[in-house]
Image (cartoon, rainbow, N blue to C red):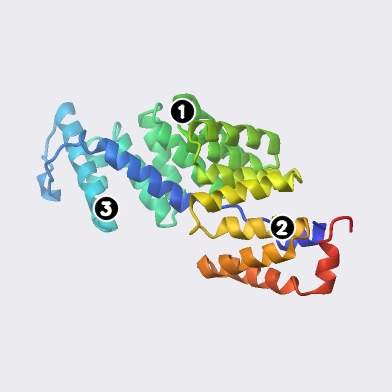
Amino acid sequence: MKASTWRRYGLPIVAGLAAFFVVLAGLWYAQRAGYLGKHTPTLASQPAQTTPSTRHEVENEFVRMAIEAAKQGDVEEALKALDVAIAANPDKAYEAYYYRGLIHAEQGDIEKGIEDLTKAIEANPHMAEAYAARGSLYLTIDRPSTAIKDFTKAIELDPDYAPNYVNRGQAYLSLDMVDLALKDLEKALQLEPNSLAAYFNRGVAYFQKKDIEKAIADFTKCIELDPTVPAPYFNRAVAYIEINEKEKAAVDLAVYLKLAKDEEGRHQAEALLNTLKDPVMMIETTPGH
């Protein structure tokens, strides 16, 4: 594809952050459920004076209450419960800091999210998911090198968790370190053979290496895994244009427009679909020109 076309219609990298937090939080909600017990406290139940063991119990109870509130969509109540959990055991409340950091991030306050996740790491340096979550936030504020450090630490602590390799691969892609990205994405697929995120980002990596057929194959695999996700259709359309498969590109863009909610993405797709009828664009996108 000509440079001008690439700049205007560059492949969109999956935002992924919201999905990452939904999946990650969901996993940890399930894993922590038994550990946090069955009793639901009220905010007034915190004792005025506590020993270290009771402080830990209070923290656990309020973290569990926060999780339940978050599941019900009551963010304000979840934050109140987490504040109590932290006040009860401020030096050791790594779970409370972790969940509060996730909530801040989901509300769009990335700096507060990073601050709380850093406190979680300080309280428990072996908490792989805190490094992974903080790395994702660094990636959203365009600090991929810092993100890579966090993802690397998360991988050291939990080497069999595929999403950490996907996230580090995406960070490498943002730095144009394509070979390192491919290595991570292939490792992710070894661990999780049906990882849509890994196939998607590997497709982007192959496109950057001008291996268009492999890029198309990976975007096609994404569509097979979940035909309701719009981004692979857009990316496959761009890849089809690269090899002058205009009709296939037009079909994919039409499907993308039916599925996509993002206004900017829809605007790009509509513009690109219109250019498929433009003779000048057809000359630009014909191989060899």
Instruction: Please give the label number shown on residue 279.
Output: none
Instruction: Please give the label number shown on residue 71.
Output: 3
| Image-quadrant location for residue 107 | bottom left
Location of mark 1 (residue): 160
Q: Does residue 148 lie above or below 13 as drawn?
A: above
Foreground pick, 217 / 208: 217
Q: Is residue 123 in view?
A: yes
Q: Is residue 12 left or right of residue 155?
A: right
Q: Residue at x 63, y 32 (%)?
A: 183
Q: Residue at x 28, y 51 (%)?
A: 79
- Give residue 22's position: percent from left, percent from top: 39, 49
Q: Is residue 245 left or right of residue 145?
A: right
Q: Residue at x 54, y 39 (%)?
A: 166
Tell which tag, 1 or 3, sits nearer the viewer.
1
Location of mark 2 (residue): 240
Disc 2/disc 3 C-alpha distance (Å): 41 Å
Tell which tag, 2 or 3, sits nearer the viewer.
2
Q: Are marks 1 and 2 in contact (CB under 8 Å)?
A: no
